[in-house]
């Protein structure tokens, strides 16, 4: 069972002020390829899994931004950690 939810908003700085959406798409692709459960929202993406695994995914996302030519990256991260188990459904069920 997952023990964490991690939401990330990744903001890459591009060399010539290019549109960041292709970069964000590439960051989401890193999450997709990781196999963790995730949900894309308008301003951030939330992942569900083991905390160490989710932090490793964030590291890969940042490396991917550099590979694509980003000069620097801001990663705004929110963490919900519950060793007994954490899930997006449980936290949001009363709203659905």
Image (spheres, rainbow, N blue to C red):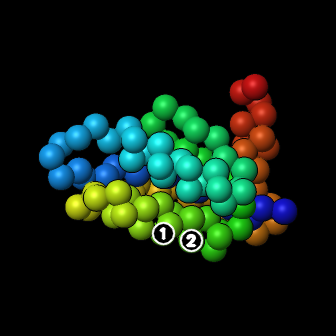
Q: Residue at x 55, y 35 (%)?
A: 41
Q: Describe residue 76's horizontal placement relative to residue 84 as left or right.
A: left
Q: Tell me, yes or no, if residue 74 can be seen here.
A: no
Q: Residues within 10 Å of mark 1 (few under 14, many from 20)?
A: few
- The residues tagged by marks 2 and 1 sit, at their Cα atoms, a distance apart of 5 Å
Q: Tell me, yes or no, if residue 91 can be seen here.
A: yes
**Do tag 2 and tag 1 residues touch (Cβ < 8 Å)?**
yes
The residue identified by callout 1 is 59
Q: Residue at x 56, y 50 (%)?
A: 29
Q: Residue at x 60, y 54 (%)?
A: 31
Disc assigned to residue 5 = none
Viewer-closest of 95 and 61? 61
Viewer-closest of 64 and 44? 64
Q: Describe residue 79's horizontal placement relative to residue 19 as left or right.
A: right
Q: Residues within 10 Å of mark 2 (few under 14, many from 20)?
A: few
Based on the displayed image, in which of its 4 quarters is residue 65 positioned? bottom left
Q: Residue at x 38, y 38 (%)?
A: 21
Instruction: Tell me the SS state at disc 2.
Output: helix
Instruction: Tell me the SS state at disc 1.
Output: helix
Q: Which residue in the rendered view is the most extreme toward the front?
A: 68
Image quarter in which the N terminus is found: bottom right
Q: Is 85 rendered above or below residue 29?
A: below
Rendered location of residue 5, percent (x, y):
65, 55
Rendered location of residue 82, percent (x, y):
72, 63
Rendered location of residue 30, percent (x, y):
56, 56
Q: Which residue in the rendered view is the most extreme toward the left?
A: 16
Viewer-closest of 52 and 12? 12
Based on the displayed image, in which of its 4 quarters is residue 64 positioned? bottom left
Q: Describe residue 96's horizontal placement relative to residue 74 as left or right.
A: right
Image quarter in which the C terminus is found: top right
**Numbered marks: total:** 2
The residue identified by callout 2 is 56
């Amino acid at each position: 069972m997952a023990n964490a939810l991690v939401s990330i908003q990744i903001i890459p700085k591009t060399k010539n002020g290019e549109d960041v959406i292709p970069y964000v798409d590439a960051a989401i692709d890193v999450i997709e390829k990781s196999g963790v459960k995730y949900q894309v929202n308008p301003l951030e993406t939330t992942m569900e899994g083991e905390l160490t695994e989710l932090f490793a995914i964030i590291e890969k996302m940042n490396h991917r931004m550099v590979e694509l030519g980003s000069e620097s990256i801001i990663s705004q991260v929110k963490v919900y950690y519950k060793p007994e188990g954490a899930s997006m459904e449980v936290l949001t069920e009363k709203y659905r």
